[in-house]
Image (cartoon, rainbow, N blue to C red):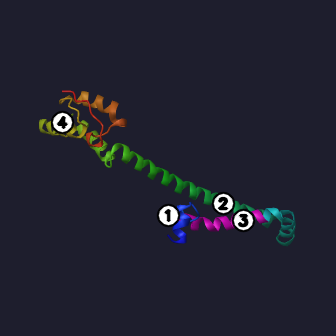
Amino acid sequence: MDGADEQRAAGGPLAIEEDEPRRRRRAAAAPFLVLLGLLLLACAFSARILAFAAEQFGFERLVAGALGFLFLYVAWVAREQGRLRERLLDLMEEVLKVFYGPDFRRRRQAVDILVRALESEDLKVRATSREHLVRLTGVDLGADAAAWSQWWAEHRSTFRSPESGEKSHVRS
């Protein structure tokens, strides 16, 4: 066992290797951290710096510069909030895929369309719709469009196809 393997086994600094997205996020955060460090340093010497800056540039320019930095900070926070929202939505989508199956959205849309198709005037369309509804849901409510609409309204939000592992209640 070499030194790196020993440190990993002991839970040392090499225990967890960083993945590429984490490295990219850290690299993207580096300029902000430098700016934050400079700001903290500026706060430590704020009285002298403010007096010097007001003397050199004038109070109005100093305030304009501070407002500019505040705008940049707010823009950065808004950008990060958008990225966080995207990641959260991606995570929610993955959880839903695990729980309801990989193609749960397509199946729900298909059941929506098939339930509406049961109200068609064409007998062949209604028969085909019923056949596919039984296949997709594992439930047989006959060709009654009202019964299917009511059942779908009650079960749409928690619908899991028979392939996803949930046992359906078949009613003939």
Above or below, 159 relative to 23: above
Secondary structure at badge 4 equals helix
Q: Residues within 10 Å of mark 2 (few under 14, many from 20)?
A: some
Say whether disc 4 or disc 3 marks the residue closer to the N-terminus.
Answer: 3
Q: Nearer the viewer, mark 1 or mark 2?
A: 1
Q: Nearer the viewer, residue 98 or 123?
A: 98
Using the numbered discs, state the Cα–Cα distance from disc 4 to disc 1 in whole angstroms: 47 Å
Q: Are marks 4 and 3 in contact (CB under 8 Å)?
A: no
Task: Report the mark closest to the observer, 4 or 3.
Answer: 3
Span colored in magenta:
21-41
State which tag comes first along the sequence, 4 or 1: 1
The amino acid type found where label 4 is placed reads Arg
Tell me the mark number nearer the camera, choosing from 4 and 1. Answer: 1
Predominant SS along the magenta part: helix
- Circle 1: residue type: Pro
Between 49 and 53, the one lying in front of the other is 49
**Would you name the residue on which mark 4 appears?**
130
Residue 82 within the magenta-colored segment of the rendering: no
Which residue lies under the disc numbered 2? 73
Q: Which mark is residue 37?
A: 3
Q: Secondary structure at mark 3?
A: helix
